[in-house]
Image (cartoon, rainbow, N blue to C red):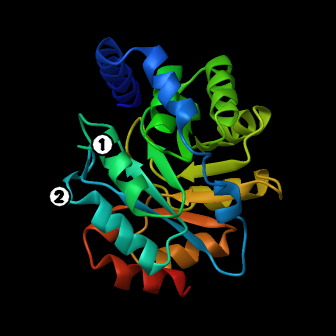
Amino acid sequence: MLTELLAGAVADAEARRAVRPSVEVEAAALARAPAIDALAALAPADRVKIIAEVKRASPSRGQLAEIPDPAALAVSYEFGGASAISVLTEGRRFKGSLDDLEQVRAAVSIPVLRKDFIGDPYQVFEARAAGADLVLLIVAALDQGTLQSLHDLVRELGMTALVETHSADEVHRALDIGASLVGVNARNLSTFELDQDLFGTLADRIPSGVVRVAESAVKTAADVAHYRAAGADVVLVGEALVTSDPIRTLTEFLAV
């Protein structure tokens, strides 16, 4: 599944490149105001922090929410206390777009993450051109050389990479490229199985000074508390927010 998702995302980027050449996207990226300091926004604190996700659908659950106005949802997330907004921009299986990202960026003052299957530098420039402050890089999807070069490009453009892992080896690979924001996804993107205890088994491998993000398998405040007890500085939440009253749910999650 991960291979299919990455191939589809890169193919869609190639189609966009045919319409909007690299030189144009790179110029737009460089013309943007500087990215917001996501590491400062997500730095460890006395309370857990939340990255709240704009997510219409997923391969594992299908349609989750229509979200006709992603900007309005993002505003409610910011009002509810989220520290950053994640916007799924993959169109085939998650029903997102770069337009969603641009709308969200224009509506909120906190960092915005482009969550997609990134495998080409063009996609990184697209992210900055659309106003992203963070870009997701999935270790399992990339060889080490590509992971390093994309991570370096993200930094050169003033953004922060959320480097996603799912095993001890992948955590090691993330640290080897100098990642300062490391996520552990409870969902195996090859099988889509969930393991909520995975974060706890890997957290100690992520040194102090690197922000630890727990991803997936969050439905209740108890799930957030579980991750917090295991050492999460930040928890990324999507489905639980788009299928409920987001402000009330965020209030409950941030109270753990």
Name the foreground residue: 165 vs 20: 20
Question: Is 179 rendered above or below residue 244?
Answer: above
Name the foreground residue: 182 vs 68: 68
User: Residue 81 in the image: x percent, y percent?
Assistant: 50, 78
Residue at numbered disc 2: 68
Residue at numbered disc 1: 99
Q: 240 left or right of 160?
A: left
Residue 137 visible, this orientation? yes
Label 1: how many residues lie within 10 Å, few (<14), some (14-19) or many (20+)? few
Q: 13 left or right of 152?
A: left
| Mark 1: amino acid | Asp
Residue at image location 72% in from the left, 75% down from the top:
45
Q: 186 left or right of 201?
A: left
Label 2: how many residues lie within 10 Å, few (<14), some (14-19) or many (20+)? few
| Mark 2: amino acid | Pro
For the view shown, which residue lies furthest in the right direction? 208
User: Residue 201 in the image: x percent, y percent?
Assistant: 67, 57
Q: 115 left or right of 18?
A: right
The secondary element bearing badge 2 is classed as loop
Name the foreground residue: 142 vs 251: 251
